[in-house]
Image (cartoon, grey):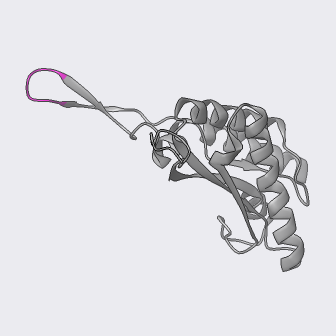
Amino acid sequence: MNIKLLGAFAAVALLAACAKPAATQMSTGNGAAMTTGPAPGSEEDLVANVGDRVFFGFNASSLTTDATTTLSHQAGWLQKFPQIAVLVAGNCDPRGTEEYNLALGQRRADGARDYLVAQGVNGSRIQTISYGKDRPVAQGNDEGSYSQDRNAITSVQGHNPQEGTGASS
């Protein structure tokens, strides 16, 4: 039963990660249409067009096939925007001790970071942090909620100070 539930959740998560919002068209007043949507290179662009999170199994920090697919898309996005720096935050479900979950969350964040670096993203652009069980994304005390909390979330932190400044040191 739990396998079926996890499979169904994985399918829903995959579909949600792949969904792209439709762009809207606005008139510029001179007869030309302007497409709107998330600004390229923004947090919203990452979330909408690539996916900002990967999920892990119970007490696990190894990357799943779905996770590597999402991280490959993130690596491509980061290569498209070399001036962007990101934070990868590892998270856990509420079970376990604080110390255990902080360490597990750090392994999850480091695993995602290592995959991005292996795909050619400069490691100086990626910071990691573990929030352990302190930042749940789902409400509830059931496996469906727990599986959403076991993640690594990539967020845009701004511009990479080592790219595009033109300054010498």
Looking at the rendered structure, the number of numbered marks drawn on it comes to 0
Displayed quadrant of residue 14: top right
Q: Looking at the image, which residue is at 36% across and 32% down?
A: 23
In the displayed structure, 56 sits above or below 117; it is: below
Q: In x, y percent, where is residue 140? A: 71, 71
**Nearer to me, 84 or 94:** 84
The reply to whether residue 1 is visible in this rendering is no
Examine the structure image and report whether residue 30 is included in the region drawn in magenta: yes
Specify whether 92 is left or right of 33: right
Specify whether 101 is left or right of 153: right
State the residue lying farthest toward the top: 31
In the displayed structure, 28 sits above or below 95; it is: above
The reply to whether residue 52 is visible in this rendering is yes
What type of secondary structure mainly makes up the magenta span?
loop
Q: Looking at the image, which residue is at 36% across and 38% down?
A: 37
Q: In x, y percent, where is residue 28? A: 14, 29
Displayed quadrant of residue 145: bottom right
State the residue lying farthest toward the front: 169
State the residue lying farthest toward the left: 30
In the displayed structure, 82 sits above or below 10; it is: above
**Nearer to me, 79 or 160:** 160
Displayed quadrant of residue 100: bottom right
Q: In x, y percent, where is residue 12? A: 68, 43
Specify whether 29 is left or right of 151: left
Q: Looking at the image, which residue is at 66% across and 65% down?
A: 138
Q: In x, y percent, where is residue 157? A: 53, 54
Q: Looking at the image, which residue is at 74% across and 31% down?
A: 119
**Nearer to me, 125 or 154:** 125
Examine the structure image and report whether residue 45 is included in the region drawn in magenta: no
**Magenta span covers which residues?**
27-32
